Amino acid sequence: MAAHRRSAHRKPKQRPLAGSAARTAASLALAGAATAGSVTSAGAAPAEPAPTAAQVRAKVDRLYHDAEVATEKYNGAKERADAATRAVDALTDEAARRTGLLNTARHALGALATAQYRSGSLDPAVQLALSSDPDTYLERAAYLDRAGDRQSGLLRDIKRQVSRIARVKARADQESERLAARRAELREHRTAIRTKLADARKLLATLTAEQHAAYERSADARHGGGPAHADRSTGRAAPVSVPNSRAGQAIAFAHGAIGKPYVWGATGPNAFDCSGLTQAAWKAAGVSLPRTTYTQINAGQRVPRSQLAPGDLVFFYSGISHVGLYIGGGQMIHAPRPGAPVRIAPIDQMPFAGATRVA
């Protein structure tokens, strides 16, 4: 009896799994172990390695170059927007002037109609019958004929002015649409420039002070930097022989700009971008250049590198995104990039793309 009670309280023995049940359990156990292992490895996975100082420098250079490309596109869009603005303003002025002429013709016609109404519009035969003085009637009839001719002329003038005003307003609407498109272009390029420059600043901020200083020294070397080149008083090269007085005036202006900051979209007098500097330099010499690098290269006679003369415009990169003013001896004056003022630099520090002789 006691033995029976002891066996009643004893736990039933676990029987080992067999067949498919055993295989299923083993698979679940392995899957669980793999999952746990993956979580552990994910948690312990090393972070993405930080870029090296050399990689940061290369990316910053690329961002500055891309920003300069966007700057020249911005300059072109701004030039087109300014032209569209002038066209809209001119058409608006023309519409206002023609509206004034229309109102003058309408007032004259109104005054003529009022005078005719007050003088009466009796049939000429009746007026002749009632007139006690035929000579007076004949004078009045001649006046009425002239008034009719004048009225017809005023009506023709009104019709002509209405038609012209309609055409002017249609052209103004077209120019306004172009202006809206140019302004959209400006916003797009402005955003691109600001984004690229902000990205460059963020990358530079990841460098140590020593690495940052090394980058600036490297960039200066590539763009002809150094204190002597950045300073307006000590950065002057030895006098060079210029082909004509205008080239001399352009070079003199560029020398006077040495040390002034690079600011994208700027044309002076206190800051410049690359094409803004060359445009301002030649403007000082009495020559009007277009605004952008890719239009300035076609503004004169193309010359090979072997025949460069002081005053020539020298262009760089395949997209014609940078320009400087050649001063002789393999040197130019240019506005390099944000953070680098106008300076003298060797022309062999960037990929040469061509040269143009302006005058």
Image (spheres, rainbow, N blue to C red):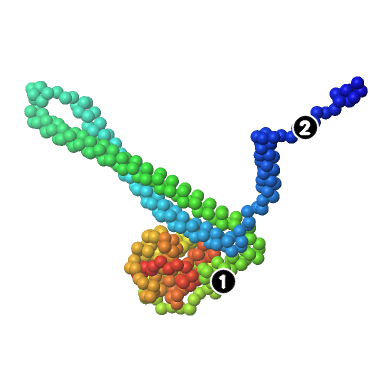
Among the two numbered marks 1 and 2 on one chain, the one whose residue lies closer to the N terminus? 2
Q: Residue furthest top?
A: 1
Left or right: 213 in relation to 321: right
**Front in this rendered view, residue 142 or 336:** 336
Residue denoted by label 1? 226
Q: Secondary structure at mark 2?
A: loop
Q: Which mark lies nearer to you, 1 or 2?
A: 2
Q: Could you classify mark 1 by the number of other residues whose Cα lies within 10 Å: few (under 14), some (14-19), or many (20 or more)?
A: some
Q: In the rendered image, is residue 96 in sight?
A: no
Left or right: 104 in relation to 240: left
**Front in this rendered view, residue 168 or 309:** 309
Left or right: 3 in relation to 189: right
Q: Quadrant of residue 116?
A: top left
Q: Vertical placement of 64 versus 156: above or below?
A: below
Report the residue at 66% width, 62% height from top: 208
Image quarter of the N terminus? top right
Report the residue at 92% width, 23% height from top: 2
Report the residue at 55% width, 59% height from top: 59
Q: Residue furthest right?
A: 2
Residue denoted by label 2? 14
Q: x%, y% of residue 320?
A: 41, 62
Q: x%, y% of residue 333?
A: 47, 69
Left or right: 102 in relation to 290: left
Q: Quadrant of residue 298?
A: bottom left
Q: x%, y% of residue 230?
A: 55, 69
Q: x%, y% of residue 323?
A: 44, 65
Q: In the rendered image, is residue 329 in sight?
A: yes
**Circle 1/circle 2 CB separation < 8 Å:** no
Image quarter of the C terminus? bottom left
Disc 1/disc 2 C-alpha distance (Å):
86 Å
Name the amino acid, label 1: Gly
Name the amino acid, label 2: Gln
